[in-house]
Each structure stands twice: as C-alpha cells, then as structure tokens.
C-alpha cells in the first residue's frame, strides 16, 4: 500500500458543541473545481469524524515540515481522551467563514462546509465545499513517507 506515498500530510481541525479537535491525515484530495470541493477520509471511530458529521464543517490545515511534531501528536493522540489543543500547546486562530479553529502558521488553509459523507469501505469520505481558501506562508509542506504506522516524514527539496 505504500506505492502512492509520499502523501501531503494535513491536520484537519473541527469544532462541535464548543469542543475543538485536530486529526492528522494523509488521505485527502480535491474532488471538484466547480464547485470547489475537497475530500478527506476518516475512520468512523475517530472523534473528529463524529464532530464533523455533527457540525458539518472542517478546516484543512496544510502543515509545514517545522510542524512535524504536531503531526505526530495529533495523529497518535485520541481526541476521545484529550484536549489536543491544550495538551499539545497548539496555537490556533479562528476561521473566518466557518465556526472552526485553524492551526497558526500553516502554509495554507481550506475552510469547508460538508456537502456529503459517504461510507467507502472501512473509512468515510467527507466532501466539503470550500468556502474560503487562505494562503499562509511558503514554507515547505510535510509529507508522510509510509503508512505502516512508523510515521516517517519527508518534504520537498
């Protein structure tokens, strides 16, 4: 399954009933130009999946190589048992067009409103209409090199 790696690593942030969460993902993709749709893939057992399903909003945070430790933290810590923003010391700011946090100092952000959630095998695909696209900095983005659970990362040269 590692043939399609490396994959751009993102952190998806969400909010439901006043609680914020963040989850690291490598399974994501543009889904349409017009309307501009973006898809993310989540396991149904994830707290973030349930939050996105309830709130119908999420933010795609394109993280930088400097945020590798943050990717590891958000990818290995369960939102069921932790406040990732507090415990991970994650600096956040508010999205402008959705009720959701975003992670400070990312290379780009997509603010999305859910238009559909589709079960695809052992994951769910959340398709979001991009309501705001924000360019952050131009630091190098983080890529996951494998999917074997070793969490090996790289970047572009």
Image (tube, rainbow, N blue to C red):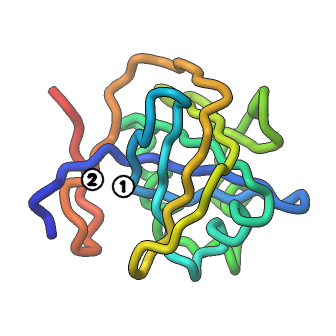
Asked if marks 1 and 2 touch (Cβ < 8 Å), the reply is: yes
Residue drawn at point x = 65 percent, y = 25 percent: 132
* In the image: residue 139, left or right of residue 18: left
Q: Considering depth in this image, is 60 or 55 the residue closer to the camera? A: 55
| Residue 112 sits in quarter | top right
Residue drawn at point x = 15 percent, y = 55 percent: 4
* In the image: residue 138, left or right of residue 144: right
Question: Residue 36, percent across and down?
Answer: 53, 31
The residue carrying pointer 2 sits among few (fewer than 14), some (14 to 19) or many (20 or more) residues within 10 Å by Cα, namely many
Q: Residue furthest left?
A: 3
At mark 2, the secondary structure is strand
Tell us which disc is closer to us: 1 or 2.
1
Q: Which residue is mark 1?
A: 26
Q: Which residue is mark 2?
A: 144
Q: Considering depth in this image, is 8 or 128 the residue closer to the camera? A: 128
* In the image: residue 154, left or right of residue 75: left
At mark 1, the secondary structure is loop
């Amino acid at each position: 399954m590692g043939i399609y790696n490396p994959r751009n690593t993102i952190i998806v942030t969400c909010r439901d009933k006043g609680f914020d969460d963040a989850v690291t993902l490598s399974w994501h993709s543009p889904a349409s130009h017009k309307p501009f749709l973006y898809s993310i893939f989540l396991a149904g057992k994830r707290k973030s999946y349930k939050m996105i399903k309830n709130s119908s909003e999420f933010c795609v945070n394109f993280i930088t190589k400097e945020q590798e430790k943050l990717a590891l933290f958000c990818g290995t810590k369960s939102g069921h048992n932790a406040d990732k923003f507090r415990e991970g010391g994650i600096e956040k700011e508010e999205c402008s067009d959705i009720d959701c946090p975003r992670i400070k100092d990312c290379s780009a952000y997509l603010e999305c409103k859910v238009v559909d959630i589709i079960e695809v095998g052992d994951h769910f695909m959340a398709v979001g209409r991009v309501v705001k696209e924000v360019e952050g900095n131009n630091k190098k983005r983080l890529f996951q090199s494998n999917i074997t659970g070793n969490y090996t990362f790289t970047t572009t040269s």
